[in-house]
Image: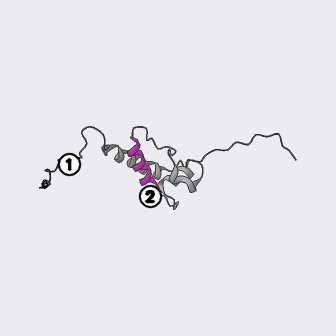
């Protein structure tokens, strides 16, 4: 029997289903707007790796999605974001990465001419 309804689909980027929390690009109550893409990925990785201490048995990312009013995951997530802000981007000026000095040219034996 035909139904006059429009079916819409969407791609879950982690904000909807807990099993996709590791794909989340944003989490409820977590402000990553000041982070570079590299810093954001590092913070999200840590949020998905660390367990929440509220007793929910979820990761911090899962807890933020499932229980956005949890004060424990909110405070820990804010601390992780603050830590990520301190990490300099690899391509930023003033980065602590030192350039590798060029090595001395190798002694290459000159080919002998034919007689």
Determine the residue positioned at 31% across, 46% down. 87
Is residue 48 within the magenta segment?
Answer: yes
Asked if disc 2 and disc 1 are in contact, CB closer than 8 Å, the reply is no
Determine the residue positioned at 43% across, 38% down. 33
Quadrant of the rendering where the C terminus is positioned: bottom left
Residue 85 picture location, percent across and down: 35, 43
Residue 3 visible, this angle: yes
Determine the residue positioned at 25% across, 42% down. 95
In the picture provided, is 55 more to the left or to the right than 2?
A: left
Element under disc 1: loop
Residue 63 visible, this angle: no
Element under disc 2: helix
Q: Which dot marks residue 100? A: 1
Color encoding of the figure: one colour
Mark 2 or mark 1: which comes first in sequence?
Answer: 2
- Closest to the observer: 34 or 63? 34
Q: Is residue 38 above or below residue 107?
A: above
- Closest to the observer: 31 or 69? 31
Q: Quadrant of residue 19?
A: bottom right
In the picture provided, is 87 more to the left or to the right than 8?
A: left
**Residue found at the very far front of the displayed protein:** 115
- Closest to the observer: 90 or 50? 90
Q: Residues within 10 Å of mark 1 (few under 14, many from 20)?
A: few
As measured in the structure, the alpha-carbon distance from the residue carrying label 2 to the one carrying label 1 is 33 Å
Residue 96 picture location, percent across and down: 23, 45
What residue sits right under mark 2 in the picture? Answer: 49
Residue 1 picture location, percent across and down: 88, 47
Determine the residue positioned at 57% across, 52% down. 66
């Amino acid at each position: 029997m035909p139904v006059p309804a429009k079916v819409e689909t969407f791609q879950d980027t982690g904000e909807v289903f807990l099993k996709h929390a590791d794909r989340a690009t944003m989490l409820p109550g977590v402000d990553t707007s000041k982070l570079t893409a590299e810093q954001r990925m590092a913070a999200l990785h840590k949020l998905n790796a660390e367990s929440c201490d509220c007793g929910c048995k979820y990761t911090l990312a899962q807890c933020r999605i499932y229980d956005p009013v949890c004060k424990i995951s909110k405070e820990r997530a804010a601390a992780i974001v603050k830590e990520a802000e301190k990490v300099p981007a690899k391509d930023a000026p003033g980065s602590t990465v030192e350039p590798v000095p060029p090595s001395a040219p190798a002694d290459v034996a000159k080919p002998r001419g034919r007689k």
